[in-house]
């Protein structure tokens, strides 16, 4: 409360008081958020105790009431909000990044006809789940393809982050051998096959 007292030459006085109520703009951002690498996340602020229209200024240059970001590293985002009366509030939050699983499968593999080939992700089955296009759910799968084909696997880690790897399997034809079923020759005489 602020008061003003005025006294004139006759020693008469008057007083007037004004009560100033301070208003603070409350801005909050979600906390404890972690997303998989490459995922999008929309940051939605919660604003209270404001008057009139709101304007937003984000640390990454956005001016919208929400901010959609792509997560490629753990990063801090902040926003400053102002209302129609000029009151200002701000908040910040850190969004974590969970790494996607990485597997080193070859992009293509050659296999002879009627032979088998094993594709091994070399990832732990206790911390990952697997879904091969063949229906297998193990970390490695053995195939005996009759023709060339593509095989893919989707693997998910403990943070529910996913990655997909595809392998092109090229089936190579076996050589054709043509021999007679029997050969008659005189003893001790050479012969050609």
Image: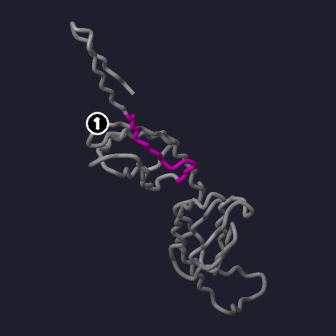
Q: Is residue 102 above or below residue 188?
A: above
- The x and y percentages for residue 91 are 45, 39
Residue at 26% x, 43% y is 84
Residue for point 60% across, 61% down = 160
| Residue 140 pos. (x, y %) | 68, 68
Q: Examine the rendered structure and indicate whether residue 131 appears above or below residue 91.
A: below
Q: Is residue 9 above or below residue 45?
A: above
Q: Nearer the viewer, residue 172 or 188?
A: 172
Which residue is denoted by mark 1 in the rendering? 86
Q: Quick check: is 148 in the magenta stretch?
A: no
Counting from the top left corner in percent of width and height, residue 156 is at 61, 63
Residue 42 position in % (x across, y down): 42, 55
Badge count: 1
Q: Which residues are magenta?
A: 21-36
Q: What is the image's colouring?
A: one colour
Q: Is residue 76 left or right of residue 177?
A: left
**Residue, far right:** 187
Question: Where is the C terminus found, in terms of image quarters?
Answer: bottom right
Does the magenta run of residues contain 23?
Answer: yes
Q: Locate the N terminus and report the quarter of the image it occupies.
A: top left
- The residue depicted at 71 percent of the width and 89 percent of the height is 185
Task: In the displayed orientation, state which residue is furthest to the top.
Answer: 9
Q: Residues within 10 Å of mark 1 (few under 14, many from 20)?
A: some
The front one of 130 and 71 is: 71
In the rendered structure, the answer to whether residue 83 lies left or right of residue 9 reads: right
Q: Give whichever of 164, 93 is nearer the camera.
A: 93
Q: Quadrant of residue 184?
A: bottom right
Please report the residue visible at 63 percent of the width from the left and 90 percent of the height from the top: 180
Q: Secondary structure at mark 1?
A: loop
For this rendering, which residue is in front, 127 or 187? 127
């Amino acid at each position: 409360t602020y008061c003003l007292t005025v006294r004139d030459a006759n020693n008469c006085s008057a007083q007037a008081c004004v009560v100033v109520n301070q208003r603070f703009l409350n801005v909050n951002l979600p906390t404890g958020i972690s997303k998989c690498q490459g995922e999008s996340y929309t940051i939605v602020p919660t604003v209270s105790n404001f008057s009139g229209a709101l304007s937003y200024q984000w640390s990454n240059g956005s001016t919208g009431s929400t901010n959609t970001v792509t997560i490629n590293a753990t990063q801090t985002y902040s926003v400053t909000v102002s209302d129609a009366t000029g009151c200002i509030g701000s908040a910040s939050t850190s969004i974590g990044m969970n790494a996607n699983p990485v597997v080193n499968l070859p992009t293509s593999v050659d296999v002879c006809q009627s032979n088998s080939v094993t594709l091994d992700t070399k990832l732990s089955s206790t911390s990952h789940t697997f879904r091969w296009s063949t229906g297998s759910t193990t970390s490695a799968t053995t195939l005996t393809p009759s023709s060339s084909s593509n095989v893919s696997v989707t693997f998910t880690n403990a943070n529910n982050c996913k990655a997909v790897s595809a392998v092109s399997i090229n089936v190579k034809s076996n050589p054709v051998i043509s021999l007679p079923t029997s050969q008659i020759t005189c003893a001790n005489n050479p012969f050609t096959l």
